[in-house]
Amino acid sequence: MTTSDYVDAGEAVDQGRLSGKVAGGEIAPPVTENLTYERILDARSEPENWLTYYGTYDGQRYSTLDQINTENVSRIGPAWIFQAGVSGIIAGTSTYSFEATPIVVDGVMFLSGWDGWVWALDGRTGKEIWRYKHAVPFDVSLCCGNVNRGVAVASGKVFFVTANAHVIALDAGTGKRVWDKTYGDVRAGESGTLAPIVVKNLVIVGSSGGEFGVRGHLDAFDVETGEHQWRSYMVPKPGEPGSESWPADGEAWARGGGNCWLTGTFDPETNLLYWGTGNPAPDFDGGVREGDNLYTDSIVAIDVDSGQIRWHYQCTPHDVWDYDSMSECILFERDGRKLLAHFDKNGYMFVLDRTNGERVSITPFVDRITWGAISRDGQVVPKIYPEEEGVEVHFYPGPAGAKEWTHAAYSPKTGWFYVPIQDVGATAARRRREFREGIPYWSAGVAVDIEEAVGYLSAFDADGNEKWRWRNELPMCASVLATAGDLVFAGEPSGEFNAYDARTGDLLWQFQCGSGHHSSPVTYAIDGRQYIAVPVGWGGWAEGFLPGMLGAGHGSALIVFALPEQTPSRGDH
Ligand SMILES: O=C(O)c1cc(C(=O)O)c2c(n1)C(=O)C(=O)c1cc(C(=O)O)[nH]c1-2
């Protein structure tokens, strides 16, 4: 059977809308036509919804809801559970993991799973309203796990990307496909894992595939028609600005990596998208790509209307440790200055002026950093790197990074960032790989430290001062949520979902979810009741990063918590 045999299979499973009659009553079809760009811009003013990937365009993952707070969080419990473990064409044998951020619009939750699944659920009860399945070819080249980080919703449509690099628009009311475009070459090893964002009339998506030696890019499509609007490559071709950072001869640039595999943030005043780019390819073998290798491992500011790069800041020039800078750029202000904060895989917190990319401060945020050092004035001095073929070198942080893709949160109330940290080293021995299209271009044998791995959740102020730290025996590798209830939520690889006091770091509540956390919790409210939702499910690349967790149960549940509803008193019976 070949890939093409599956091309139209999406139609066959595109019929999943439930009739609307389910036990417990009618579920009205979702109405999202009135979810405009203006509403998403002002998402902070409607905290009952979670309208875009980070909650708001600024990437803060902060909600002003405070019904659940430090006083009462100990009383929250499960309100409903949704099981996303639907078998698919490539599930079972694949490296799946449940990594989605749910989007909530006026009582309806939109959620994606691995293998091309998308669901609309009643946010009050978890009942399914419709489901959609994209038929992912079984032989798709997965760069880094069978994962999907969520959908975007706007103008009556739900947008998502697929493992075989399609971007698809569904009718939000019915789950029927409206348009479907291909934005990557799956045979070359390109794929899609991120949640799109909608800005103005554009759906913006980025490529995955860094371990296959592809050339990373960001693409914009028209929300209504799916027409392609612009593409911005993250590696310049010869003659373009930045091309001097690649070898003049040969095609290293054309297979140079720099993928955009995590959702960016957006500032309507600068009209810029702030996007982190992935590692250069091949990962550890710098010998075949002399130079700084722009714009890999960089924060790139992109004009949202044209796709043009306005400025960039490279966090790890000439990376040979696999330090993607894909992590979010959190937008915040201090003393009237428009800034962004970024916690990089390389162990440093970067604060930049987001109008021009000027460096404001650089501070280490993890205890052990041995690969090199970055001085306060931005000088990068590499110390340990896999230079010689077959010779093992050990460095901190390992290729999983001091912080993985899972997101930090920022509370404007405390002015602090809450960061999930992995203090894990690795040993790598370089081995040269010939480039072959569609074949992994991974140029080292890597062993992650098992014994020495620890983790913490830390709070930092904008100058990089650590305000508190909660230590864990395992690395923390799930996104954080901050709320105006002075709470911070974060999950552990061993399954505990935790609530902390945002000011002290005290652990206030814990619930064992039955599988590890490697996704992103959100909060929303319906009819005045606040909910906390967390997708739970260990797997994907997280397993490789934490060999100590190999064999741990692969869960696939979305668990939603709330305070108990008022229980009827005896007299009510
Ligand atoms: O360079 C890339 O294109 C790329 C893509 C992805 C991805 O799409 O998930 C990951 C990585 N790199 C990567 O380096 C990595 O550590 C990683 C972890 C995960 C995950 O889902 O847990 N994805 C990816």
Image (cartoon, rainbow, N blue to C red):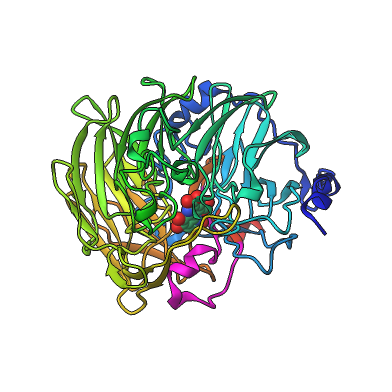
- Residue 453 to residue 418: above or below: below
Q: Position of residue 108 (x, y in %)?
A: 64, 41
Q: Is residue 479 magenta?
A: no
Residue at 19%, 44% in the rendered image: 362
Residue at (54, 23) in percent of width and height:
37
| Residue 358 figure quarter | top left
Q: Tell me the magenta residue range.
A: 531-556
533 drawn magenta: yes
Q: Nearer the viewer, residue 563 or 438?
A: 438
Q: Residue at x 36, y 43 (%)?
A: 293
In the picture, the quarter occupied by the N terminus is bottom right
Residue 8 located left or right of residue 147 = right
Q: Is residue 359 left or right of residue 508?
A: left
> What residue appears at the point 24 percent right and 39 percent down from the top-left corner?
351
Residue 404: % across, % down: 40, 56
In the image, 192 versus 333, the foreground residue is 192
- Quadrant holding the C terminus: bottom right
Q: Is residue 90 visible?
A: yes
Please count the marks in the image: 0
From the top left corner, tell me how far across and down residue 159 is, in percent: 64, 37
Extreme residue toward the front, this view: 249
Asked whether the viewer can see residue 564, the reply is no
In the image: residue 103, left or right of residue 496:
right
- Relative image position of residue 329 (x, y in whole percent): 36, 39
**Foreground: 541 or 283?**
283
Query: Is 292 situated above or below 518?
Result: above
| Closer to us: 161 or 520 | 161
